[in-house]
Image (cartoon, helix red, strand yellow):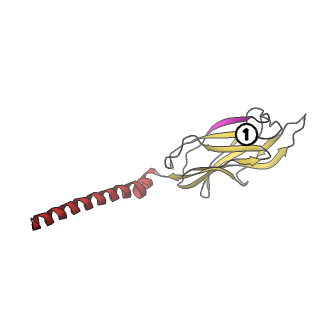
Amino acid sequence: MPVSYTQEVHGLEITAEPVEEPSPVLWTDTEPTIDVEFNNTTDNTWTADTAVHLRTQIDDNIVWSEEVEIGADLPPGESTNVSVDAKPLTYEGHAVLGFSISGGVNVNNENHPSSLNPGGDDYLIRPTSAFSVWDKSHYDATVRRPKQFQKGIIFTSIVLIIFAGIQLWLAYA
């Protein structure tokens, strides 16, 4: 089941999640489009070069990372969305989509609006979304086929019960 989080960094709320809702999972051959929302909850304006380092990590493997900028000045109380195309999710496991920053924040004043510097892959990830990633054939073998097998067992049991009932009816009739 996918989970989404909103992270707040110095009054800038950041949410990132796949546009396509996992149903129930995302597949290893999926190249998800990521929707990143920046929401300014401060009295300061964030500059267009404000950026975060967005990445997808599956278990201990970083499968995709990219620097994402706001792209336009973000006045107080405003929000903006940026869409980013990610690379294929090449590993099975528990995926975490998140971002990192280097901690460099320029303080706002009239001459210099606030900006946020992106971190790299070595910086701590701030999670914004979590979901499962499966290979289709492995999912079929471990989830779908056993469900079909269980349905077959239930059908066979019902047929055997009906057959036993007919035998009892014939024996006592």
91, 78: nearer the viewer: 78
Q: Is residue 60 above or below residue 51?
A: below
Which residue is more in the foreground, 20 or 91?
Answer: 20
Q: Where 34 falls versus 139 (above or below)?
A: above
- Per the image, is 158 magenta? no
Q: Is residue 14 left or right of residue 159?
A: right
Side (left or right) of 49 relative to 99: right
* Residue under the point 37% across and 58% down: 146
Quarter containing the C terminus:
bottom left
Span highlighted in magenta in the image: 70-84
86 vs 151, left or right, is right
Residue that label 1 marks: 39
Q: Residue at x 75, y 32 (%)?
A: 72
Task: Classify 10 Å Cα crowding around label 1: few (below 14), some (14-19), many (20 and above).
Answer: many
- Dominant secondary structure, magenta: loop
Q: Is residue 119 visible?
A: no
Q: Amino acid at mark 1?
A: Asn
Residue 88 visible, this angle:
yes
Q: Left or right: where does residue 1 sit relative to residue 72?
A: left
Seen from the viewer's position, the closer of residues 133 and 5 is 5
Q: Position of residue 117 (x, y in %)?
A: 78, 44
Q: Please state the horizontal and vertical placement of residue 61, each as a whole percent of the image.
A: 61, 55
Residue shown at the point (90%, 37%) measured from the top left: 109
Q: Residue furthest front?
A: 173
Q: Secondary structure at mark 1?
A: strand
